[in-house]
Amino acid sequence: MKYLSTRGGVDAVEFSTVLLEGLAPDGGLYVPAHIPTVTKPTLQAWRSLSYAELATEILSLYFTDIPKHDLAQLCQKTYTAEIFGSAQIVPLKPIDEHISLVGLSEGPTLAFKDMAMQLLGNLFEYVLLKQHRELNILGATSGDTGSAAEYALKGKKGLRVFMLSPQGRMSAFQRAQMYSLDEDNIFNIAVKGVFDECQDIVKALAGDIDFKKKYHLGAVNSINFARIAAQIVYYFWAWLRATQHEDQQVSFTVPSGNFGNILAGHYARQMGLPIHHLVLATNENNVLEEFFNTGVYRPRASEQTYATSSPSMDISKASNFERFVFDLFEQDPNSVKQLWTQLQTQGYFDLSSKQAAFEQAFGFVAGTSSHTERLAVIKETYEQHGVLIDPHTADGVNVARHFSQPNIPMLVLETALPAKFSETIQEAIGQPAPRPAALENIEQLPQHVMELECDVDIVKDFIQQHIGEN
Ligand SMILES: *Cc1c(COP(=O)(O)O)cnc(C)c1O
């Protein structure tokens, strides 16, 4: 399998390059040169596989420059009961006779990002060792991504993590999760600023070509195709658990922000998995919902992005969306380039002429959810069905109810556990969410964090000082 850029400006590359580079050098996103398909008999044969075995089969179609037996070892090492809480790795949890949750948040940081990030940690270590290289991951986080990355990369050979977070802007639990890590290769940097300013520092340093080269800087953000590929696996897993026959369809509802999670569902569907609808759920930041219902894509500025009670979806520019548009235009990079130029000059583009294809060809439909609805759904799901869900998953369940159809199981991706967002749970049901025993006193643990001024050169100095020390 070779990989191309959505903007057509680079030669085809192997998977390992995609893994280490993240973004394509022409500013586009790496995409597989073709989507591999899976036949019905193969699907049937996969019913008996463990999660790690299924991951090996699916990912070997994409990671073709890694020998399959090595990939099998990496998957076995990643998807274990110790890391994901049970041998199932991803349990299906029914809410009622129509809707089930896909349990993607049983990993170390209680959010679905662990599913891909844990594999990424092992892939990085493997490829770097083979190429005798090292990599320094530089990132900015407002919560979930940073902790998922740190728990996946801690202790890994050849890797260091420099993670910027906005000082005083994360929940006490999120801070404790990241800062309590005591690892030689993890550097938490609390910047005196907001998330966007952290992000700007990362962009400035990653854009400094000499610095980037000299210090082997890399990224783990959700545009990395390795993360998308790892997420394809659980769509197959959930379908295999929810159906008996090879032609049976299911629908998925996906609480969405950067369009990474649902994009993996799009690839699963293109590969031949019988998916009826891919239901995109947003919160009040409904740029993507607007696109699927009107055809107009109009990203918003960060000042126009609401701070909501499902904060990990507070995104108004969905980085992965470009990959879907590439498919909408039958893999034509010139159309993508033109549209993104238009985005820069006009601030929007209008694809309403293609709107019929969103659902008919690709299965996409979309809905949105408000704070009031979110709280009501958490309360109702808890009181009527005895299942406690987090605010992001609640956005999913709320939208899923509008699209649920008889005889088609509706599977809602559980993107986080309620323990992570206990303040909102308290507001919805009048009591806090229970916490896994291992995290009971996490706020009391000593914290390891460096507080720095919001300044590119100060952060740059800190990184230089700490590379080569360990
Ligand atoms: C990251 C995240 C999302 C959004 O996922 P995307 O892949 O960015 O669409 C939704 N819910 C939670 C809890 C998250 O951490």
Image (cartoon, helix red, strand yellow):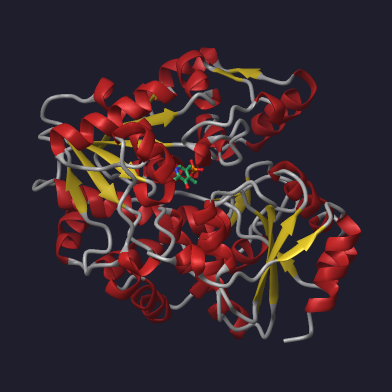
Task: Give the answer, above or below, for where 371 lies relative to 175.
Answer: above
Residue 209: % across, % down: 86, 61
**Residue 86 falls in image quadrant:** bottom left
Task: Give the answer, above or below, for where 153 lies relative to 271.
Answer: below
Q: Which of 79 and 63 is in front in this view?
A: 79
Q: Is residue 260 visible?
A: yes
- Number of numbered discs on residues: 0
Q: Does residue 452 appear left or right of residue 447 in this picture?
A: right
Q: Does residue 30 appear left or right of residue 328 in this picture?
A: right
Residue 252: % across, % down: 30, 37
Q: Nearer the viewer, residue 462 or 120?
A: 462
Q: Residue sitting at 71 percent across and 27 percent down?
A: 303
Q: Is residue 32 visible?
A: no
Q: In which quarter of the image is the C terminus?
A: bottom right
Q: Residue sitting at 67 percent across and 20 percent down?
A: 348
Task: Give the answer, above or below, for where 46 lies relative to 98.
Answer: below
Q: Which of 128 and 430 is in front in this view?
A: 430
Q: Residue sitting at 22 percent across and 34 percent down?
A: 381
Q: Does residue 449 appear left or right of residue 103 in this picture?
A: right
Residue 99: % across, % down: 19, 35
Q: Does residue 432 appear left or right of residue 342 in this picture?
A: left
Q: Residue sitting at 34 percent across and 70 percent down?
A: 79
Residue 14: % across, % down: 59, 65
